[in-house]
C-alpha cells in the first residue's frame, strides 16, 4: 500500500498484479481516509504515559477502526503510520463515507480517552494513478479540518477546496507584512492593555456583523460591544461599515488563524 500511495511502482500492471495476489482489484474505484490522533505529541508530554501504555492506546484505536470498517465496509486496507492510520476503502458516497468517519471519531472519543482523532477524506479514485491523488486530498482535508474545526473532526475534500488557497497564502512570505498592516496595531494594543479586542472583532464577523448577536455571544451588553467596535475602528483606522475595509479585515483574521495553527 505504501508503494501505491507514493506512486513508487514501475507499471500499472505491476501494482495491479500485486494487489490481485492479496485479493484486491485495484482497477475498482477506491477512496482514501487519513485518520490522525489529535495532538498525540502533547499527550505524551503532558500525560507522560509509559511506552507500553501509549502503544496500547494505539492498538485499541487500530482494533476499533478495523471493527468499524468490517461492520460498515468490505475489503478495506489499513496502514498504520506513526500517529496516523491510512485507509484504502471501496468507493462510497460522500454521505456514507462521512458517516463512517464520524462513527470512528465517536467511538475513539469514548474508548481511548483522553485521545481523539480527526479524519480527512479524499475524492473517489478511478484506477491506481488516482489513488495517490485521493491520498493527497485526504491529507489536505485533514489539515484544513484541524484548523477550522479543531480536534475530533471529519472533513471531506469537497468541503475544504476553497480553504486550500488560504492555507497556501498563510505560508506566503508576504503574509507577515499584510497582517501587520491590517491587524498589527490591534494585536499590539491587546498585548499592552490586556484586552480582547481581536476576539471581539472575530466574534463580530462570525456573527455576520450583527451587533446584538455578537454581544450575546461575548456575554456583554450591547453598548459595551458598540464601545469596543468604536475603539477597534480608532486603533485600526478602519471604518467597519466600509465593505473594502471589512473584506481586508476578514481575510486577515482568517489568515492569522491559519498562520497560528501552521506555526504550532
Image (spheres, grey):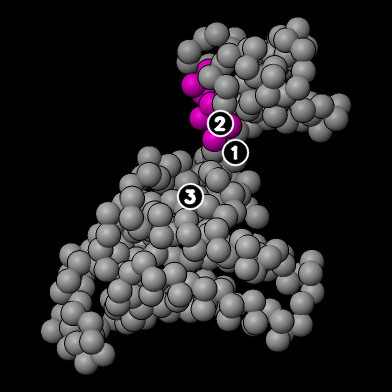
Asked if residue 249 is among those painted magenta in the image, a careful observer would answer yes
Determine the residue positioned at 39% across, 64% down: 33
Q: Is residue 109 above or below residue 175?
A: below
Determine the residue positioned at 70% across, 63% down: 114
Q: Which disc, if any, is residue 256? A: 1
- Residue 224 lies left or right of residue 108; in this view the side is right
Q: Dot 1 surroundings within 10 Å: few (below 14), some, or many (20 or more)? A: some
Q: Is residue 213 above or below residue 39?
A: above
Could you say where residue 204 lies in the image, as x and y percent from the top left?
62, 21
Residue for badge 2: 252
State which tag comes first along the sequence, 3 or 1. 3
Magenta region: 246-254
Label 3 and label 2: CA atoms lie apart by 17 Å
Determine the residue positioned at 59% across, 54% down: 151
Nearer the observer: mark 3 or 2; the answer is 3
Tag 3, which secondary structure?
helix
State which tag comes first along the sequence, 3 or 2. 3
Determine the residue positioned at 52% across, 9% down: 242
**Residue nearer the viewer, 116 or 262:** 116
Residue for badge 3: 144
Q: Is residue 54 above or below residue 244?
A: below
Mark 2 and 1 residues: CB-CB less than 8 Å, in contact?
yes
**Quadrant (top left/top right/bottom left/bottom right) for the N terminus:** bottom left
Q: Is residue 15 above or below residue 253?
A: below
- Residue 152 lies left or right of residue 137; in this view the side is right
**Residue nearer the viewer, 10 or 204:** 204
Q: Dot 3 surroundings within 10 Å: few (below 14), some, or many (20 or more)? A: many
Q: In the rendered image, which quarter is residue 49 located in?
A: bottom right
Q: How many marks?
A: 3
Amino acid at each position: 500500500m505504501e508503494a501505491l500511495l507514493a506512486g513508487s511502482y514501475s507499471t500499472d500492471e505491476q501494482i495491479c498484479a500485486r494487489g490481485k495476489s492479496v485479493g484486491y482489484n485495484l482497477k475498482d474505484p477506491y477512496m482514501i481516509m487519513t485518520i490522525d490522533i489529535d495532538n498525540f505529541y502533547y499527550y505524551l508530554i503532558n500525560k507522560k504515559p509509559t511506552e507500553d501504555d501509549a502503544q496500547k492506546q494505539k492498538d485499541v484505536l487500530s482494533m476499533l477502526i478495523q471493527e468499524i470498517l468490517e461492520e460498515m465496509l468490505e475489503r478495506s486496507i489499513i496502514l498504520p503510520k506513526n500517529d496516523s492510520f491510512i485507509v484504502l476503502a471501496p468507493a462510497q458516497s460522500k454521505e456514507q463515507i462521512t458517516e463512517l468517519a464520524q462513527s470512528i471519531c465517536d467511538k475513539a472519543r469514548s474508548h481511548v480517552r483522553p485521545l481523539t482523532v480527526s479524519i480527512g477524506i479524499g475524492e473517489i479514485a478511478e484506477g491506481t494513478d488516482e489513488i495517490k491523488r485521493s491520498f493527497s486530498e485526504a491529507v489536505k482535508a485533514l489539515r484544513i479540518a484541524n484548523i477550522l474545526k479543531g480536534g475530533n473532526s471529519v472533513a471531506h475534500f469537497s468541503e475544504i477546496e476553497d480553504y486550500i488557497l488560504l492555507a497556501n497564502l498563510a505560508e506566503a512570505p508576504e503574509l507577515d507584512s499584510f497582517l501587520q498592516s491590517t491587524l498589527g496595531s490591534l494585536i499590539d494594543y491587546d498585548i499592552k492593555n490586556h484586552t480582547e479586542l481581536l476576539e471581539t472583532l472575530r466574534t463580530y464577523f462570525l456573527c455576520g456583523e450583527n451587533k446584538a448577536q455578537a454581544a450575546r455571544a461575548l456575554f456583554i451588553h450591547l453598548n459595551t460591544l458598540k464601545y469596543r467596535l468604536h475603539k477597534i475602528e480608532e486603533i485600526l483606522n478602519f471604518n467597519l461599515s466600509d465593505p473594502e475595509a471589512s473584506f481586508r479585515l476578514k481575510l486577515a483574521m482568517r489568515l492569522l488563524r491559519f498562520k497560528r495553527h501552521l506555526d504550532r
